[in-house]
Amino acid sequence: MKKFAFGTLFLGVAVLSACGNGGSSDSDVAGGEQELADELYFFNWGHNIDEQILADFEEEFGVEVIYDTYASNEEMLTQINSGAISYDIIIPTDYFIDRMIQMDLLAELNMENIPNFENIAEEFQDLEFDPENRYSVPYLYGSTGLAYNTEVFEEPPTSWEVLWDPEYAGKVTAHDTSRDFVSLALQRLGKSINDLDDASLEEAQGILGDLNDNVLKYTTQPAAELISGQTVASLAYSDQAGIAMAENDAIAYVLPEEDGGMLWMDNFAIPSNANSQYTAEVFINFMLGAEVSKMLTDYIPSSNPNAAARELMSEEELSNQASYPEIPDSSEYYVDPTQDETRAINRIWNEVRAQ
Amino acid sequence: MRKKTKIILGSFSVLVFLFFYIPLFVVMAFSFNDSSVGTVWTGFTTQWYESLFSNRQILSAVQNSLYIAVVTTIISTILGTLAAIALYRYNFPGKRFLNVIFYIPVAMPEIVVGISLLALYAMVGMTLGLNTVFPGHVVMATSFVMLVVMARLHGFDPAMEEAAKDLGANKWQTFWRVTFPLIFPGVLAASLLAFTISLDEFVVAFFTTGPGSNTLPVLIYSMVRRGVSPEINALSTILLIFIVIVVLIVGRVLIQIQSRGGDRS
Amino acid sequence: MKPIRNAYALLSPAIVWLTLFLVVPVALITVISFSTDGGYGLIIYEFSLDAYLQAFDPFYLQIIWQSIVWAFVSTVICLLVGYPFAYFIAHSGKWKNILLILVMIPFWSNLLIRLYAWVILLNNEGVINQLLLSIGIISEPITMLYTPFSIIVGMVYGFLPFMILPIYASIEQLDRRYLEAAEDLGAGPVSTFLRVTLPITMPGVIAGVFMTFIPAVSVFVITDLLTGNRLVMIGNVIRDAFVVEMNWQLGSALSILLMALVLLSVLIFTRFTSSRSKRVTR
């Protein structure tokens, strides 16, 4: 029997709760008598949807959408894990799906209610963190690569090395997330971003001090300084790069050919303590409709895994190199680290900066 | 104050006010900025004001924040003021201990307040919502209120209360007619602080809020990964102008009433 | 016996509230800090000192020390700026309440938004540098952002009201007759200030120092934004322990360690100042 989290910590309710969480919900979903709930509780990343979509859903299905936002997977997970809160839909990123499945926090989806799943391009189905899409459906995806100024770099940089280059000291930025920080070094050393044994991490830490000396700041929003020309190269999420490119033609985005860069995927998932799994599935299905899905990426410069939506896009939209860059073979998705690995990564991030 | 001191202090204070307000002028200016990334100026637009009013999420977050801040201010001002009076005036067993207790919320990192309350709510099976936010805010604000009112009470002259009692005033009359007016500036300062703390707090609020009851700081904080929407600048501008106008009007009226009733200062 | 009953009557609402929403959660955190880590926030109720062994790591202690130093420096500057400012407001007659509210209004708009404004102001290509360049005072932009200077600007900006308000509350009641008496006795303005004004307003100063210093120790949002996430504060470490590493034991142990340190310094400081200020007034 598994025991999880502090919902189950106290008063010895571990047994009860484990049953509650672990009880599979697919058995009671089948059958025809499903009804829509009056409300749908949706917990999403901040700034991650065109709110018109929610209004359209409300109008079409007569379900009120209660919409809240979070800043990181970790914070969302802490809240969901407490058991004191229930949402119908959450949007965890790739390896958090895996972790939440391990923690028994997600409900199995009833795909009969999500026929539009077939709109998802095949390459984005059955990804490693949820091999049969039993718990999750792609929402948006993107990559973490290099946004750079073409006036400084005539050829696209092929390695993270530019971030280390003393010539650009104070003119480069990196992410303020420990995992991305350490991954830069791992990829530069020719290792996998999921190669987290002690020796690799130690080697990575060895070269991160120089990176730390070189960066202007750590941020996940490098767009402003890139646009103004204050920085010339930044580690950037593809959507942030897209924002910068839209405002300054000199900015370009690339996944460095030698090192690879990181891939990520945000996904719809339904917490196991959702109020109405059926309503959530209807909502996911609605979101996967070609036109709705296109609205989503019209508003946010992330990449769309929805093949049907892509068919509606113009040539120009599809050739946007931020949203649809060339993906080197060495690009990878993150795999969920163990807790010890997370701790080690965080430790490096703190130690390097505190030097 | 001597004239020279007054001029020096006055000019110094103007500088401090500038220090406080210049960032807000920047926020106002950038609320008309064409760029969506906020920190570079690219051109003039009013689009953020237009989209602000169709953004339900922001508007309801403003309402939630105000509600929480007002409730927090009322409760914590009452609790903190009463506690300060008791701690100042009386000697009783456990006083030292209580004094320390009141410092704990100030000393505790907000994340610990937030997470421990979340754990508590989960333990007792409480469903999170708007009304699970203010208990944490009240805890933090009460300490600040208590400290400010205590500072005011030092130097409070008990002879005044004695005199009132000698003149036949009962406890309530003494409190409302003598004690309260004397400590009022402290209570006002304290309640302003309580309001300010609650209105802009987001760590405790994030962990203790439930579906549909995001506060504005929680909402803004949730945007940091993708960049905070310039609509927030527009909102800040509107709120700021509105508040300053209200304060100045109310202030003027109060001053007029005061000067008609005889200037007490 | 009656005064004691009165005291408890006045205190009881606060005590009830603090017990429910502070003492109980803190007790919970304390218990958790001594429990066994079951992974991903799972708590196994077996006594363990692991978390404290991890917390008493020289690296964390160094970060705590660094946080204390930054908090201390900011507090001193807040005091130096806040005292004269509060003094002026308290002496501005019928305008004082309005001025007081005007001090608070900036703090009703969001902290992140105001900090972004500071980034815009202090940036190499920011408003201040552009202004100075165009007047010709400087020929090259001064690097202000992501330096110790910007940390101090941010911390002082964030915490100054917490210094001003209690000092204001205690200066405002300063009886002018004391000052006049001192001057009649031939004391100059400086010695009047040092011997009369300052000791009488000391409780406000102490409250202000605590209300600035203590929260400043665990701050991280301000330092994150104004150093570009280059400074590690104990607040960052505690948040990461809870949220990123999902190690509640370590997060709790670090919080308790930090609280103990802070409360200890409060106790020492009050001892020291209360005996001192009594000597001065008498």
Image: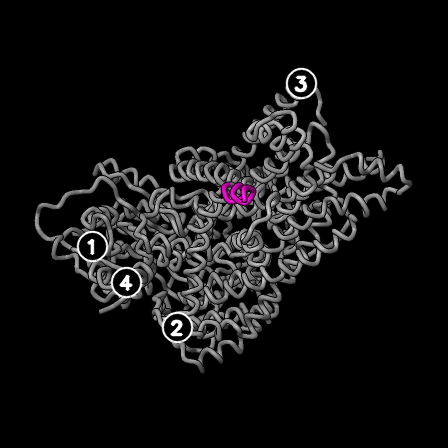
Q: Residue at x 54, y 41 (%)?
A: C2
Measured Cα–Cα span from mark 1 to mark 2: 49 Å
Which chain is mark 1 on? A
Q: In this figure, which residue is indicated by the disc labeled 4?
A: A12
Which quarter of the picture shows residue B61? top left
**Do we see residue A159 in this rendering?**
no
Measured Cα–Cα span from mark 1 to mark 4: 41 Å
Compared across the picture, whether A28 is left or right of A63 comes to: left
Give the label on residue B178, or none: none
Give the label on residue B261, or none: 3
**Do we see residue B65 in this rendering?**
yes
The reply to whether callout 1 and callout 3 are in contact (CB within 8 Å) is no
Q: Main SS type for the magenta part?
A: helix
First-in-chain label (1 vs 4): 4
Tell me whether marks 4 and 2 sit on the same chain.
no
Q: What residue type is labelled 2?
A: Phe
Q: Residue at x 65, y 50 (%)?
A: C156
Compared across the picture, whether A286 is left or right of C276 comes to: left
Give the label on residue A117, or none: 1
Image quarter hosting the N terminus of chain A: bottom left
Measured Cα–Cα span from mark 1 to mark 3: 74 Å
Q: Which amino acid does label 1 sit on?
A: Phe
Q: In this figure, which residue is indicated by the disc labeled 2?
A: C47
Q: What residue type is labelled 4?
A: Gly
Secondary structure of the residue carrying numbered label 3: loop
Q: Give how far across and how far down residue C94 sits, in percent.
A: 69, 27
Looking at the rendered image, the disc whose residue lies closer to the viewer, 1 or 2, is: 2
Compared across the picture, whether A251 is left or right of C125 comes to: left
Magenta-drawn segment: C1-9
